[in-house]
Each structure stands twice: as C-alpha cells, then as structure tokens.
C-alpha cells in the first residue's frame, strides 16, 4: 500500500466518527506513520553509515594530530578535518533523532514539522557541499601526505590552487545534479502529510 492509497482511505472517513471508526482511524494513522518511516529509511541508514565511518576517522585524526602541530600550515588542515568530522557526527545524530522521534502518538502537525525539518537538513547538506568538497579534499591531501609520507604538498606550489579550484567546480556539478533529483520518497511523505492535515482540519 503506497501513500496515495492511504490518502484515499483517509478521505473516506466521515467527519462524525463513532468509537469504532475512531479506533480504525487511530490504526490507520499508525499504519500511515509507519509507511512514512519506511520511506525515510534511506536517510536513516545514510546517517548511521556516516557515523560508523566518522568515529574511527575522528579517532585517527586525533591520534595523528600531534605530528601536524609542527606548523600552522599543517595544523590548520588537521583542524579543518576534525571540525568536519565532529560536524558530521552531530548533524547525522540530529537527523537520527528526528527520524526516531516520528511516532503515531504525535499529532499530524508535529509529524509534518519533523518531516519538514528533515527536508531542510537534506537541502542544507546538499548546499554545504560547495564548501565541504573543496575544503575537505584540500585538507585531506595535506594531512595524509604529511602524516604518512612526511611530505609537504605546499612545496608543489600552484598545483594545490589548481586542485582546489577543480574541486570547487566538481562540487558545483554534484550539487547541481543532486538538486535536479531530490529525494522523491521524502517529497511524497511531505505531500501526504499536508493532505492528511487538510483532511483533519
């Protein structure tokens, strides 16, 4: 049963409901909310995977940090990577909190606000790629070269500037395509909740 079918069922409920119909409507609401959560499982798993990868990566960064503190030009990339990792952990943790807070005991309005918040976070995540892709890749190369090979990539001169500009162009292309193909299941869930809110009011 998809969200369109659930919407049609919601439309068939009378305004004046008896106890049996009320019970059925509560059950329908529970089924509807569960269907919405099923549609959002991709966001849930993406967040879990990011957290699983970021925790050991952050540990790795912190363990290598003392070697990077010999100069500001090496310390700065290390702190950029650490900042991104902590931000990612908090960001994904908040998305998971929103996902697991979706419950049939909430009002439709509250669920609607939660889904819209998730949609906002998804849009924000796409937009910050303009910064993350060039800055992260630049800092990562500097960090890895110094940490593992004790090599100063700054010695390559303008190559780093060209690389960063190229990364920015790639970021623009990726963001463009991501915006052309938004999360359809999330959009359907938002549309479904708007319709249910209109029916209830």
Image (cartoon, rainbow, N blue to C red):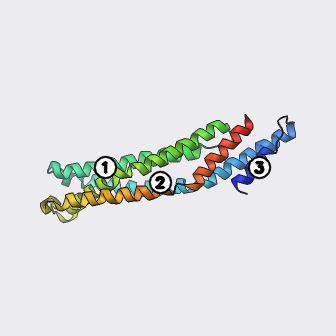
Check contact, mark 1 vs mark 2: CB within 8 A.
Answer: no
> Quick check: 31 above or below 152?
above
Q: In which quarter of the image is residue 137?
A: bottom left
Residue 25, percent from left and from top: 79, 42
Q: Name the one closer to the observer, 151 or 131.
A: 131
Counting residues from the start of the chain, the first of labels 1 and 2 encountered is 1
The kind of secondary structure element at disc 3 is helix
- Tell me the residue that label 3 is attached to: 8
Seen at 64% across and 47% down, the residue is 191
Residue 174, percent from left and from top: 40, 59
Seen at 14% across and 50% down, the residue is 71
Counting residues from the start of the chain, the first of labels 3 and 2 encountered is 3
Question: Which of the labelled discs sits on residue 82, or is there none?
Answer: 1
Counting residues from the start of the chain, the first of labels 1 and 3 encountered is 3
Question: Which of the labelled discs sits on residue 199, or is there none?
Answer: none
Q: Can residue 154 be seen in this view?
A: yes
- Tell me the residue that label 2 is attached to: 179
Q: Name the one closer to the observer, 141 or 178.
A: 178
């Amino acid at each position: 049963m998809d969200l369109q079918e659930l919407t049609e069922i919601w439309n068939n409920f009378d305004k004046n409901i008896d106890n049996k119909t009320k019970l059925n409507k509560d059950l329908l609401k529970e089924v509807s909310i569960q269907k919405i959560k099923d549609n959002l499982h991709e966001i849930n798993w993406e967040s879990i995977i990011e957290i699983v990868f970021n925790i050991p990566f952050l540990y790795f960064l912190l363990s290598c940090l003392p070697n990077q503190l010999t100069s500001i030009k090496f310390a700065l990339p290390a702190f950029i990577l650490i900042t991104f990792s902590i931000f990612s952990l908090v960001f994904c943790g908040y998305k998971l909190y929103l996902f697991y807070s979706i419950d049939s005991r909430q009002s439709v309005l509250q669920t609607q606000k939660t889904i819209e918040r998730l949609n906002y976070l998804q849009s924000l995540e796409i937009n910050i790629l303009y910064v993350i892709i060039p800055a992260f890749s630049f800092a990562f190369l500097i960090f890895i070269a110094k940490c593992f090979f004790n090599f100063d990539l700054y010695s390559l001169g303008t190559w780093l500037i060209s690389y960063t500009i190229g990364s920015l162009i790639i970021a623009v292309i990726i963001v463009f395509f991501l915006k052309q193909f938004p999360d359809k299941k999330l959009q359907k869930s938002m549309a479904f909740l708007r319709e249910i809110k209109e029916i209830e009011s």
